[in-house]
Amino acid sequence: MKDRTKMMLSFVMLLMITGIIGFSYALFTTSTEKKGALNIIVGDVSCPIQSNDLENNQVTLQGGEEKEITVTFTNQSLVDIHSIITYSGSNNIEVLSASSNESEIELQNLATGTTLTYTLKLKNNGTSSETVTLNGRCGLSNKELALNEGETKITGTYEALSCEDMPQPNVPKLVEGMIPVKWDQGKSSWVKADSTNNDKSWYNYCNQEWANAVTVKETGTQQRSDYVEAEVGEKIDIEDINTMWVWIPRYEYDYVDIKTAGGTNSGSSSSPKYLNPGEIKIKFISKDLTLADEDNYIVHPAFDFGGEQLEGFWYGKFETSNKEQNCTPSTSGDVNTRCDLTTLTPQIKPSVTSWRGIRVSTAFTISQNMAKNTTEYGFSSDGSIDTHMSKNSEWGAVAYLSQSEYGKYGNDGEEVYINNCSSYTTGIAGATANASEDSGCANTYNTEAGQKASTTGNITGVYDMSGGALEYVMGALKDDATGKPTIKSSGFKTSGETNLIPDAKYYDLYTTNFATSCTQNGECYGHALSETKGWYSNTYSFVSSTTPWFIRGGYYLHSSSAGVFYYYYTFGSAYATYSFRLVLVNAEI
């Protein structure tokens, strides 16, 4: 009996030893699986690494190229683990930055069921292409993880790149008659800025401070020449200013990430509603870069002006008004009467009534004529500048910049507040982003509360893009018979001497009435249509053959429906609630 008991005990011990040996062997077994995924098995510990940026755990960098890689660990085991990530390649490969969603790159204890995301920025300092291999190591948390030959462990010793280390915006292109300005809080006034921007006091997009410039009257409290020749810091009287502009620098944006940047959809698939959309990732680029230099990025189309690549463009700081301020729009769709006149003089100023009751064709003609009015604005007469009515894509470029780290999203994370002023006064902000109409209009553009309605959340941004008046843009559905915009009630003509449909560089043409297939059956990238549909619960509805023209922004009564991502359809007529926006580019007509 004793012998049998001894035999049984010996058999059990043999099984235990076999199990331990088997576990120890499995502890360091690895297996490579599908594209971009490395599955590391550690006994009962499974920690897959996932990355859409890798092909068989590798990425190729061209000479001098920088690339951002995102890799995710998930501990799917029943025990806590220790994990690291490694890279291998030539000596030309440098890790510029490394960060994770935890405080350390090397996480000593990755709890069961948790996920760790690494964001790595790699650079190839060589002149020829190099392949980098990324791998993961994980094991029980009390074990030191060995590296293979040629591997380097990525630790938390790298500092993430600051905004100042990233590509900077193109220098604003001032034209003759333009004066760079900045706001002087002490003087409660706009003052002349240093155009060299050596001290970053004119603009600093990393601080959500956009470049501003103005034109002034030929004769006011001072002569135009006095302002042009004034020293930096000299006051520019608001009474003498007749137009105010904001520089929108050329950039590319992540057209893949934007599809999920809206966040949680509280609506439906057909009627989406995103209450708290996230960041639109953008990168400033030079005009020589016509194709995106990073995967998943696309150059914003607003910087292609009829084939000419722009370094940026100047956008009207406020809704357009007219200096006469003596016309009253009617609700009957005026034609060449009341405010639908090309004889009025456009201006861009705060605290005035916006110009409404104007057809699309009249607004466009006024916008074009502005560049030729050298006396009023001081522009050159050599044809080196172009002024025009904002296109849909240009509106989209401003909206996307506002929702980036360089705009209001990067400032306070909030939606641009509505201009809820019932008298259509420019530069007003409601008490909240979705405030109901108000006749008091107390939160003017230069107050802390008023700056909530700016695309930067401070005084340097663009105003009236949410609420105020609805704004016509040069964007319309294609007329298949002419291949040009559907005219409807816009006032444009296909023949004659006046109001002819302009050159194609002045409008965005939509070939279908579906936002996801509106440009030659493709998506309208950058136009703030399908990509941002339903963001902040802004209203959206696409143009049709009967209502072919776009309007943007909503108006003062629209509350939560209004916003920079609002778009709707209309006929092109003169309405008492519709205004427009001006754009200036330093490009020959």
Image (tube, rainbow, N blue to C red):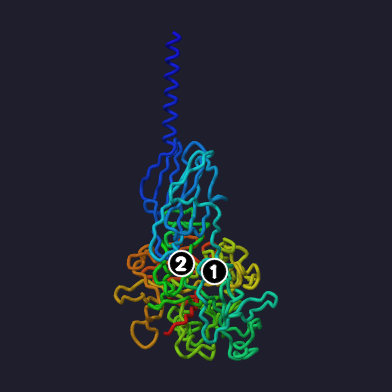
With respect to residue 452, does 108 lie above or below? above
46 relative to 120, above or below: above
Amino acid type for the residue under numbered disc 1: Gly
Q: Quadrant of residue 61?
A: bottom left
* Residue in the foreground of this view, choosing between 7 and 292: 7
Tell me: residue 358, above or below residue 26.
below
Picture coordinates of residue 63 (x, y %)? 41, 65
Q: Using the image as rendered, state which of residue 493 and residue 386 is in the foreground.
A: 386
Q: Which residue is mark 1?
A: 467
The label shown at residue 203 is none
Q: Residues within 10 Å of mark 1 (few under 14, many from 20)?
A: many
Residue 539: image location, x then y, percent: 48, 63
As helix, strand or loop, the secondary structure at mark 1 comes to loop
- Say the numbered circle drawn on residue 567: 2
Q: Quadrant of the C terminus?
A: bottom left
* Relative to 267, 217 lies left or right: right
| Residue 184 horizontal/vertical position (percent) | 66, 76
Q: Is residue 421 visible?
A: yes
Q: Earlier in the sequence, mark 1 or mark 2?
A: 1
Helix or strand or loop: what does disc 2 sit on?
Answer: strand
Residue type for callout 2: Tyr
Number of dots carrying numbers:
2
Q: Say if 537 sits above or below 376 in the image.
A: above
* Quadrant the N terminus occupies: top left
